[in-house]
Amino acid sequence: MINLVEIPLAILLMNPDGTEMSMMDLFHAGKEIMWPILLLSFVGITVVVERLLFIIRENGTREAQAVEKMLELVEKRDIAGALAIGKKSKDFIARILVYTLNNKEYSMSNAFVRASGQELGRFSQGMATLDTVITAAPMLGLLGTVTGMMKTFGALGGGNLAAASGAITGGVAEALIATAAGLLIAIMALLPFNYLNARTEQAKQEVSDASHALEILVKKSETNAPFAR
């Protein structure tokens, strides 16, 4: 009787003619489950590339000096000057401050929350999709493992094991390839996912710091004189 434990892994991942499997051969050996895994990989790559380009663009438009200058002018009660600087800047913190100062007479806190929510929403776009890829890829790999082993044990149940050796090794190979592909995609997506999460948390911290600074400077200005109009 064929002992699956004693089958060398190299034999499972070789073509019938004895040559090593190429990437395309491995894909075909993984059977039908490889198609949704491939689709997940394309989705993950698309999201990662788009998010990294977004982060690069945002890093290139940061103008910390402009934000500091705006806060200095708010402290001096020169709201018009602060707005003039903010409208020229592409910094997302500056955009938040501009919207907040434009609506300070109605509700400064609500204006800041609304503007910051819109800006931070841009940082979190695509994260749910990437999280789904990380979760679903190993699940699909596990499904491939189950279907592959089902085929293997189905072949073992036949009467002629020697004739079914190809189906047996094919089922085991399907299980191994699907599992490896799912885990590989999940691991490769997890690394940029953690980086993007860290960048989003950094943006939240920057927004929070700007909120506290603005609140302090506004309170400080209100104790001295009303805002210039």
Image: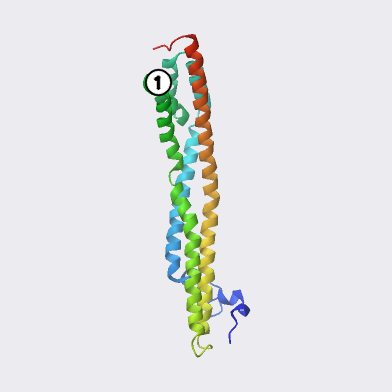
The colour scheme applied to this rendered structure is rainbow
Q: Residue at x 48, y 36 (%)?
A: 58
Q: Which residue is drawn at 54% across and 65% down?
A: 180
Residue 196 at x, y percent in the picture: 51, 44
Is 144 situated above or below 196? below
Label 1 environment density (alpha carbons within 10 Å; few <14, some 14–19, many ≥20): some
Is 223 situated above or below 124? above
Check disc 1 and give the amino acid type. Answer: Lys
Q: Which residue lies furthest to the top in this view?
A: 225
Query: In the depicted view, which residue is nearer to us: 103 or 48?
Result: 103
Q: Residue furthest bottom?
A: 159
Observer able to see residue 29: no
Residue 66 at x, y percent in the picture: 49, 23
Q: Which residue is drawn at 42% across and 34% down?
A: 117
Secondary element under disc 1, as helix, strand or loop, is helix
Q: Residue at x 58, y 84 (%)?
A: 2
Q: In the picture, which quadrant includes the N terminus? A: bottom right
Query: In the depicted view, which residue is nearer to us: 45 or 126?
Result: 126
Is 139 situated above or below 67? below
| Residue 221 as seen in the image, left or right of residue 99 | right
Q: Mark 1 points at which residue?
A: 104
Residue 105 at x, y percent in the picture: 38, 18
Observer able to see residue 187: yes
Quadrant in the picture for residue 132: bottom left
Residue 124 at x, y percent in the picture: 45, 42
| Residue 11 as seen in the image, left or right of residue 100 | right
Q: In the picture, which quadrant includes the C terminus? A: top left
Number of disc labels: 1
